[in-house]
Amino acid sequence: MVAIVDASLTRFGKRKEDVFQLAKESSLPIIRRFKDIDFVLISNSYSGEFNNVSGINNLISSYLSLDEIPSIRIDNTSGSGGSAILVAKSLIDSGQARAILVIGVEKMSTMKTREVTSVISSLLPPRERSIGISLPSLASIMTKIYMRRYGASREAIAEVSVKNHWNGARNPFAHIRKEITLEEVLSSPVVADPLRQYEFCPISDGAASVLITSDEEALSYTSKPVFIKGVAMGSDSSHITDREDILEMKAVKIAGELAMKRAKVERVDFAELHDMATILEIVEGEALGLLEKGKGWTYYLNGMTGVDGEIPINTSGGLNSKGHPIGASGIGQVIEGFLQIRGEAGERQVKEARVGLTVSMAGFGNSATAIVLGDEI
Amino acid sequence: MVAIVDASLTRFGKRKEDVFQLAKESSLPIIRRFKDIDFVLISNSYSGEFNNVSGINNLISSYLSLDEIPSIRIDNTSGSGGSAILVAKSLIDSGQARAILVIGVEKMSTMKTREVTSVISSLLPPRERSIGISLPSLASIMTKIYMRRYGASREAIAEVSVKNHWNGARNPFAHIRKEITLEEVLSSPVVADPLRQYEFCPISDGAASVLITSDEEALSYTSKPVFIKGVAMGSDSSHITDREDILEMKAVKIAGELAMKRAKVERVDFAELHDMATILEIVEGEALGLLEKGKGWTYYLNGMTGVDGEIPINTSGGLNSKGHPIGASGIGQVIEGFLQIRGEAGERQVKEARVGLTVSMAGFGNSATAIVLGDEI
Ligand SMILES: [Ca+2]
């Protein structure tokens, strides 16, 4: 087993710093504290497209004066962070490394929104991309099907955004730090009918870093390690039109079940999900069994997913409010878990946060990595 | 320990097929033979730049109808293949996967040579890139220093290319399948003085795939598994100007020594090195102790690195003749080792090829992965 023994991140948002400066800002506190890092993993998807940089793992290592430390870039689009954690765990469990610095980073604001959307559409299969499908349009279709099938109210779905912005307002590292009302969500510009601007993640720059060691060595780094109790990946068709049921989120479901089984836990105290759009938080929550199938939307009418609710989801603010710098997001999620379990989440602290689940998802759910974190082995 | 239990590759070269078709051509024979693949690693660096595709691991999986199999993209520029083998080994050793299909692929000929060179220059640190340094110009500087310091003859360095083309002419999967003479090398156009066109790898499309399992399970896949006896990475400054000695190839040296130590072997029967330029094969051979320091060039005057020589190097034809589709190269190297150790290398078969070494290098040596292959555990 492995543990997270240190964590550090930048504020997510439109940042003036370049990709190297962001990576440095997030990792320098860790590098200063620990001198024995022996492997670096860079979770990043679009440095070529957004920053005109390749081999970014080696260039970041050099920028950090970690030239002599081997490094690899791990990419799985929006799910890169989860994949990097999985690889880090394997490298340590198999004895290839002892102390791995995982840096998730993405600098996206070099391009205009329309260009960013076009670059990210390159993850869609050619057949669907060629007819103009985009991630927001898929979220739109999913919302309509969900509302029709389960009689979900429009307001309930928008409440995901209200809750996540309430949380994000309390997270000093979040991109959008302001509470918003239901009325504000529902009167924001339509992006992909019926979903509106406040229901999608913003385009963010940012970086997030963790240090991972074996559980045996963890206590020599910190008195409060957070253990990675189970990690698992699931996969699903990249062609949405090939899926039996667009609401099923098979990759998320498989990853979640297997990670829980490997962690030997049956319930969690909180979760960080991939809420690129509001609707995704609901259907992922259902796929994971955190929310009752078909009734996930009702939880949002009763505050049950809030910080003090029955099953707090996205206490960090989620992608929706915290932001979604692609390669950094999955690392940001485990950092929220790290802070919650250590009792260091400030105003958004969940009571009795001992076991948490994070789900790092790629594309529109063609890949997902679930990670169960806990305060004991 | 893990083993390579199957291998398959495309012909390298200017191919009309796209990146998906190449990946399929190389992996389909393996997928047809074995149904229990449970993880896919894609070794690829430039799908965004060359093919306008991101999340290529998931798109290739879908294209291969392996939708339900988790996948990750591994990138380390020219050294991606070696890094992917290291990750595959760790995933299996740690119990995260049992049978991993590693596909190395790159489709480069979508762009003109000048554009390809510009894209690849994006791996250089901004400080050096901004003054117009390119990989060929670094090879030029290295050659001049080597010749001056060790009194190496110009002909000896060119002989690397003659030998590699002799080998490549005997490799049905090589890009350039023709023998060339010393005169032809030395009269080919100057690329970066004193190095000439035949002394650099061509720009190639191609894909190479291997199936990796644990050593315990290997015999249920094949009667002739090739064991990965040791893998190690080394790293060095990305700033060439920061290196104490440009001829030292520190990343290669460290990786080689550690991989040999882990493999518990003291000598190898053959090696596949990263001969992006002729001079690199010589200095890498010296860094690895295969060739005597400062006298590596003399080996090429006596045929000592040929198929029937004392230490055969790049029997596949190397990057120089076989071609260098970035993400596929490191996988192509281990496939040559697989074929040699199984006695299936045809006209270029090394006698008594029982232990081999491959070195997958990134950039101009800022990262290297050494892999020791053998016929027994
Ligand atoms: Ca390096």
Image: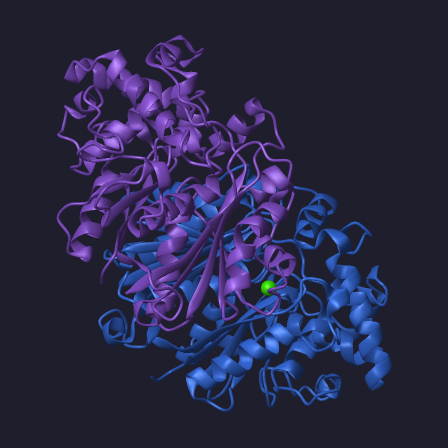
Chain colours: A purple, B blue
- Quadrant for the N terminus of chain B in the image: bottom left
Q: Residue at x 46, y 28 (%)?
A: A177
Query: Going 14% across and 23% down the picture, which residue do you hit?
Result: A295
Residue A97, position in %: x, y?
A: 42, 70
Give the side of residue B228 with respect to residue B223, left or right. Answer: right
Compared to A328, does A116 lie above or below?
A: above
**Residue B161 location, x and y as percent?**
71, 71
Left or right: where B248 falls relative to A222: right
Q: Which quarter of the picture shows residue B348?
A: bottom right
Q: Position of residue B82 (x, y in %)?
A: 50, 66
Q: Is residue B10 visible?
A: no
Q: In this view of the protein, which residue sits in the foreground, B173 or A281?
A: A281
Which of the four quarters of the rendered structure image does ligand 1 lie in?
bottom right
The quarter of the rendered structure image containing the C terminus of chain B is bottom left
Which residue does the image show at 50% across and 81% down from the upper left? B258
Q: Where is residue A314 shown, x and y percent of the image?
A: 32, 35
Residue B247 falls in image quadrant: bottom right
Is B33 in front, or is A274?
A: A274
The relative height of residue B257 versus residue B57 in the rendered view (above or below) is below
> Would residue A219 be seen by someone viewing this image from the given angle?
yes
Image quarter of residue A139: top left
Number of disc labels: 0
Please tell me which residue lies in front, B373 or A305: A305
Q: Residue at x 68, y 70 (%)?
A: B179
